[in-house]
Amino acid sequence: MSEKVQLTVSGIQEDLNNGLTRAEIQAKYGLSGRDMKSVFSHPKLKGLKTKPAPQFVLTDDTEDTDEVVNTDEDTTGILEMQTPSVDNDFSTVEPVVTDEF
């Protein structure tokens, strides 16, 4: 008897976000068509589509910064940057109300 393949929802989501199609996921894990139908009937995977991996690497050459940019398309498919130390708490911003139309 063959060994069962251990799949995780997050692993399948990551594969889709990295640009793998359902056919490529099927081949990667050695699944049958019936298995694939079962996998993608899971509520958190149902209706999810492949997110195309970008065909570019964006480099900020406008200034010298200490920000780290991850351009490894194989792991994320998107650019990641360190969170700047800017306070983005807008909860204290008062709305502007005018009587003009």
Image (cartoon, rainbow, N blue to C red):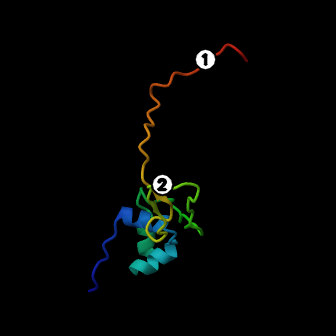
Q: Is residue 45 left or right of residue 1?
A: right
Name which residue type carries label 2: Thr
Name the quadrant of the N terminus: bottom left
For badge 1, the amino acid type reads Val
Q: Pick the residue in front: 94 or 11.
A: 94
Cα gap from disc 2 to disc 1, whole angstroms: 39 Å
- In the picture of the structure, the residue carrying the numbered disc 1 is 97
Residue 32 visible to an observer of this rendering: no
Q: Which mark is residue 65?
A: 2
Residue most extreme to the bottom: 1
Dot 2 surroundings within 10 Å: few (below 14), some, or many (20 or more)?
few
In the image, residue 54 lies at what x, y percent? 57, 66
Q: Mark on residue 43? A: none
Residue 68 found in image quarter? bottom left
- Which of discs 2 and 1 lies nearer the camera? The answer is 2
Q: In percent of the image, x 42 and y 53: which residue is there?
A: 82
Q: Dividing the picture into quarters, in which one does residue 12 lie?
A: bottom left
The residue tagged with tag 1: helix, strand or loop? loop
Identified at 53% across, 65% down, the residue is 50
Residue at the spot x=59%, y=68% of the render?
56
Mark 2–mark 1 CB contact (< 8 Å): no
